[in-house]
Amino acid sequence: MASRPAEARLAARVAGMLFRPARTLEAIEAEPTDPRGLYTGYLIPLAGLAAICGMIGVSLFGYGVGDIRVQSGLATTLIEGLARFLLTLVSAGLVASAIALVAPGFGGRRDFGQALKLVAHAGTAFWLAGVFGLVPNLGLVAGMLGALHGLYALFLGLPRLMKVRPEAALSCFAVCLAIIVLTALAADALAGRAADLGEPLWMLS
């Protein structure tokens, strides 16, 4: 797999995580840990694609509920999109660090590299669903479905990558879920503060 072009490796890994997550996670566990390569070759491309599609969708269509449509200015869209992208990268590292810390409490191992591999690959469906951000209201639904797939992948990966005891996997998953939710709420709040630096929202009927 190492001799294949980077784009082909990325596409194969994404397809594996989407359709064969258990088997793909087993292969990932045995791979050498390379945090920098994981960011540049996987996290940044997927999170970047989601961010770009989201910014285009908001710029063109805004958000709509019924007959009411809310649209932000270009500067606000760019600032918030860039902030969310950067916060995604930071959040992945923070969540991985937290998972590495809590895993030993459930019989697992304290290994940041494996935790980062788990977080990065578990988020595959969520970031890929960001393509649907080209149509923001559709992107919201796709994002929720992607998040559910990501949580399933995380649950599968805890015994495989973090070596959590199978009987403790559900409890460990619950703790990890709480960590993810808190991190996401904090990142969303920070992105909202960044968006305040741009123009005000426009409400169109």
Image (spheres, helix red, strand yellow):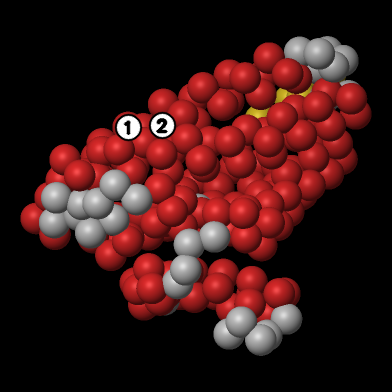
Question: Do the residues bearing badges 1 and 2 touch, measured as CB atoms within 8 Å?
Answer: yes
Q: In this view, does 33 lie above or below 151?
A: below
Residue 29 showing in the rendered view: yes
The C terminus is located in which quarter? top right
Q: Residues within 10 Å of mark 1 (few under 14, many from 20)?
A: few
The disc labelled 1 sits on which kind of residue?
Ala
Find the distance from the CA under tag 1 to the CA under tag 2. 5 Å
Q: Mark 2 points at which residue?
A: 181
- Percent across and percent down for residue 168 are 12, 50
**Quarter of the figure with residue 188:** top right
For residue 178, the mark is 1
Left or right position of 127 against 72: left
SS of the residue under disc 1 = helix
Image coordinates of residue 16 in percent, x first then y, are 49, 75
x, y percent for residue 130:
65, 51
Q: Which of these two is toward me, 189 or 103?
A: 103
Is any part of residue 132 visible from this angle? no
Secondary structure, mark 2, is helix
* Residue 158 found in image quarter: bottom left
Measuring 58% from the left and 58% from the top, which residue is drawn there? 38
Residue at 83%, 23% in the rendered image: 76
Count all numbered tags in the image, as a single digit. 2
- Quadrant placement of the N terminus: bottom right
Q: What residue type is labelled 2?
A: Val
Q: Give how far across and how far down residue 83 sits, in percent.
A: 72, 30
Give me the residue at 53% from left, 36% from top: 91
